[in-house]
Image (spheres, helix red, strand yellow):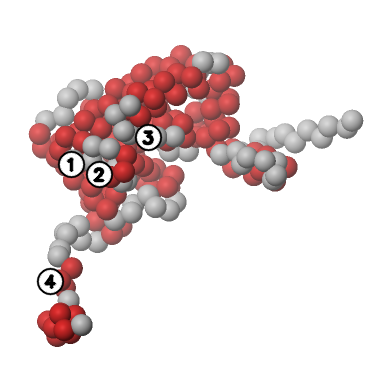
């Protein structure tokens, strides 16, 4: 049987995933995370089981995440990037170390979010793709956050989730937010400025205050 090999430097993760899904159109679709994890497992066969163990730990306290989500967090911690292609040149040792740091930072994020915001289980946990940005920030801090830093980070997380920051073009927005944390002028203030630039005012107002009085009277009569 003839086997056609499709290779070349132009075959990015997006291209490979698209080819696979076209060929395998009758089966389960492959995500970019699936491909990245398969490559990691080639060098570290226990990687999938190790990551699933962390997912099970969080599931026991009612936070349920996917392997893709956890790998995204590992990626931001290790590379400062959202796209999985940046993991391809990392060694098994680097991935293992990044997973340990990621697990610790996710624990801290969930404690902050559950304890301070009251989002203490999966059904009320919105904006989960803000966590990869949060764990990157915690990893660069190299120490505990003070009260001001913690509250700014939680304010950003709540606002990003509430306004649907990652509801579309997830990788692009994560990359933008990761870039806002880098450099001498980077940090939480720049992260919040970027959110304001994208959405506008972050002030939350009562719906009824913005409705004309005559509309309210009509509503009350109906």
Number of the label disc, if any, that sits on residue 64: 3
Q: Residues within 10 Å of mark 3 (few under 14, many from 20)?
A: some
Marks 2 and 1: which is nearer the front? 1
Image location of residue 214, percent across then percent down = 14, 85
Q: Are marks 3 and 2 in contact (CB under 8 Å)?
A: no
Number of the label disc, if any, that sits on residue 209: 4
Q: Is residue 112 left or right of residue 164?
A: left
- Observer-nearest residue: 198 or 52? 52
Q: Of the residues under marks 1 and 3, which one precedes in the sequence?
A: 3
Image location of residue 203, percent across then percent down = 16, 59
Taking the image as drawn, is residue 19 in sight? no
Residue pointed to by mark 2? 157
Which quarter of the picture shows residue 122?
top left
- Observer-nearest residue: 74 or 51? 51
- Observer-nearest residue: 44 or 26? 26
Q: Is residue 8 left or right of residue 157?
A: right
Taking the image as drawn, is residue 148 in sight? yes
Number of the label disc, if any, that sits on residue 117: 1
Q: Is residue 181 left or right of residue 3?
A: left
Label 3 vs label 4: CA separation? 37 Å
Helix, strand or loop at disc 2?
Answer: helix
Image quarter of the C terminus = bottom left
Query: What residue is drawn where x is 21% and y is 30%?
Result: 111
Label 4 vs label 2: CA separation? 25 Å
Q: Are marks 2 and 1 in contact (CB under 8 Å)?
A: yes
């Amino acid at each position: 049987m003839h086997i056609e090999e499709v290779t070349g430097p132009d075959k990015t993760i997006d291209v490979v995933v698209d080819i696979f899904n076209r060929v395998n159109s009758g089966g389960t679709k492959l995500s970019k995370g699936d491909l990245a994890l398969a490559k990691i497992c080639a060098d570290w066969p226990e990687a999938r089981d190790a990551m699933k163990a962390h997912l099970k730990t969080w599931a026991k306290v009612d936070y349920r995440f996917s392997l893709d989500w956890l790998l995204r967090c590992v990626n931001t911690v290790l590379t400062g990037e959202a796209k999985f292609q940046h993991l391809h040149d990392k060694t098994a040792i680097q991935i293992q170390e990044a997973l340990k740091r990621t697990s610790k930072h996710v624990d801290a994020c969930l404690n902050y979010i559950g304890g301070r915001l009251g989002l203490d289980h999966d059904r009320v946990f919105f904006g989960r793709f803000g966590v990869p940005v949060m764990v990157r920030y915690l990893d660069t801090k190299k120490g505990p956050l003070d009260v001001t830093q913690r509250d700014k980070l939680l304010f950003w997380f709540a606002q990003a989730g509430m306004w649907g920051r990652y509801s579309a073009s997830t990788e692009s927005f994560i990359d933008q937010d990761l870039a806002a944390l880098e450099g001498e002028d980077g940090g939480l203030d720049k992260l919040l400025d970027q959110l304001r630039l994208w959405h506008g005012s972050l002030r939350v107002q009562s719906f009824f205050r913005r409705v004309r009085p005559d509309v309210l009277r009509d509503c009350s009569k109906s």
